[in-house]
Image (cartoon, coloured by chain):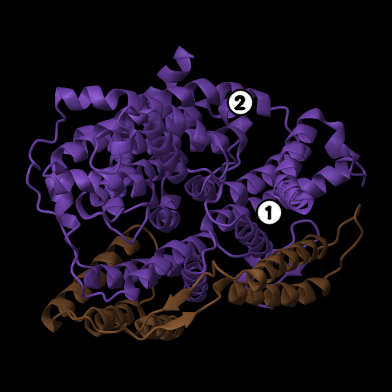
Amino acid sequence: MLENLFLGFSVSLSLANLFYCFVGVAIGVFVGVLPGLGSAATIAMLLPITYFLETTPAIIMLAGIWYGSMFGGAVTAILLNIPGQSTAVMTALDGYQMARQGRAGAALGAAVFASFFGGLIGFVGLVLVAPPLAEFALRFGPPEYFALTVTGLTLVSYLATQSILKSLCAAVLGLLLGSVGIDPVTAASRFTYGTLTLQNGLQMVPVIMGLFGIAEVFKMMESSLTTPNEITTLRGRRSVIPTRADWRAMAKPIGGGGLIGFFVGLLPGAGAAIASYVSYVLVKRWSRHGDKFGTGRIEGVAAPEAGNNAATCGAIIPLLTLGLPADIVPAIILGAFLLHGVTPGPMMMLQSPDMFWGIVTSFFIGTVMVVALILPFINLLARITELPKSIMAPLIVLVTLAGAYGVNNSAVEIWIMLGFGVLGYLMNKFEYPLPPLILAFVLGPIMEASFRQSLIMGQGSFGIFFGRPFTAVILSIALFMVLSPLIQLLRVRFRVAKT
Amino acid sequence: MRQAQEKAWKVRNGDRLSGALLLAFALYMAYEALQLRFGSVSRPGPGFYPAILTVLLACLSGAVLVRSLRERDELLTVSFGSRTSHIGLTIAAVIVYAAVVDTIGFLVCTFILVLALLIGLGKVVWRRALLVAAAGTVVFYLIFTSLGIPLPKGILAF
């Protein structure tokens, strides 16, 4: 254990990796503060650029953007009541109230330290859980991967906060979109309409930038771009360090939020946003002052912030140990790995321990960087929130256009991105959740390939899925999830019929 | 503050529309998928997996549609505000942009597009708009090209 950590830190503390970690965290915080451009779109856009980096610094940087953006999102949530990221929605509830009461500084400080300690808890969890999980996964074959992807997608759909039926629609739609391109087994073209561009399938970068970048721009355009942002006056911005009373109040929410966040993050489809929500709700329920949450309690800021940072550590575990992304950003990071010719999974820990542990330890370093390097610049960051939408929206369009073109050196990708922008916008309006679509898009090809390989292994019979104990268990969980609403429905009907 | 009554196009039963659209899409994709060889369950062809997916999607979207038809009270109302025309214009502009950017070049096209968005939609003062559009275009062009991603030079190629 200790040698692994030693190895990891020797990698992540190298000058180059430290530099890229810092760049990532800085970009992340900046992007998190900007309402509109989220971490997903930014990471997707920087994917092609990382081509010129080595794998380890590339992943370290992208991960830095990810957890950096969670802190940035908290800044706008507290100051403007506009969460810059979905992970900051719960933070806005108490954070903005605190700001209105003149305690913006304390709220920001709470967010930073809660993020730090939450990230620390997550890091410990990561170090403890990842190696045994990877060892266990060494025995996995195609049937296990099929079971995991199916159950993962089912779980994603059931964890969605909106209608389950619509989540399943989104997931199946994502699966269909993922099947566009050349069928890997028979080399037949599927849904390509004869175009060369679609032969390689839909690329992740234009898809994600469309669904998150362009769709957000459209949402911004809905209300007039000329309305100014309402900013709370920032009295009390100076003292960002929480008082002793604040620490006492925050301690338990941070611990609880961190633990909850880590385990929620582990679940496929439950990303940092859901983790922050669950952390907030549970800490509120257990707190003595629970009913005062939402009026400006510092615990209401600490719990979700600890939760979302811990969740990043949890959410990266399935990617690093199994090669299966459990959330949107890990799915994009998977794309980065593949771009560098690296397939994450249980073998990675064995064959490239320096990369594995370097990335793991970088989570700790990046979290430290957020506190050490970003805290002094909070005032500057708060200024960024004053950037008007009228300037931001066109600039976001500019950045996404360049990014989309750059993927394949082709303007066709711009049209694809635009199409997904429209799709993302409509999905938001008609209340279809995005995470099932994206995860299905990424996991679909893995799922299909495992399915077909399993059939080959089992020589055409489905028995192979039920013969192997792990697979059977996982698949029955999925089956149970699918059937349980039906059972509930029948129960209700039965009861109504009796009366 | 002006309390202008904004004209909006309201869709009264959002699920009905989305369910119907998805169902139509699923049926169309089913047709496309069946053009490919289906194969058998133990020896799936390229059309096997997509075809099953389209059937699934048809069932799910059909369920959304059916449920929306039976729902009385909690209908999802989707409203498209008066600013939807801005979105439409932006879409049209980007379509044209993608068509010409290879020939005319990134710097010129992007500058024009961003300028148009700033002035037209953002109502930014023209001096500031020119500055932001020019600075933004040049900065990002330099960033992307220095990171190794070529952007089309178009008419400025020399």
On screen, residue A1 above or below A364: above
Q: Position of residue A445 (x, y in %)?
A: 68, 54
Q: Which mark is residue A445?
A: 1
User: Is circle 2 on the same chain as circle 1?
Assistant: yes
Number of labelled discs? 2
Q: Position of residue A390 (x, y in %)?
A: 23, 73
Classify the position of the N terminus of chain B by image quarter: bottom left
Chain where mark 1 sits? A
On screen, residue B87 above or below A205: below
Q: Amino acid at mark 2?
A: Leu
Chain B appears what colour?
Answer: brown
Discs 2, 1 touching: Cβ within 8 Å: no
Residue at the (42%, 81%) spot, across then down:
B91
- For label 2, the SS is helix
| Disc 2 packing (10 Å; few <14; some 14–19; many ≥20) | some
Q: Do we see residue A242 in this rendering?
A: yes
Question: For mark 2, what is the residue?
Answer: A133
Query: Is A355 left or right of B105, judged from the image as shown?
Result: right
Q: Position of residue B105 (x, y in %)?
A: 36, 80
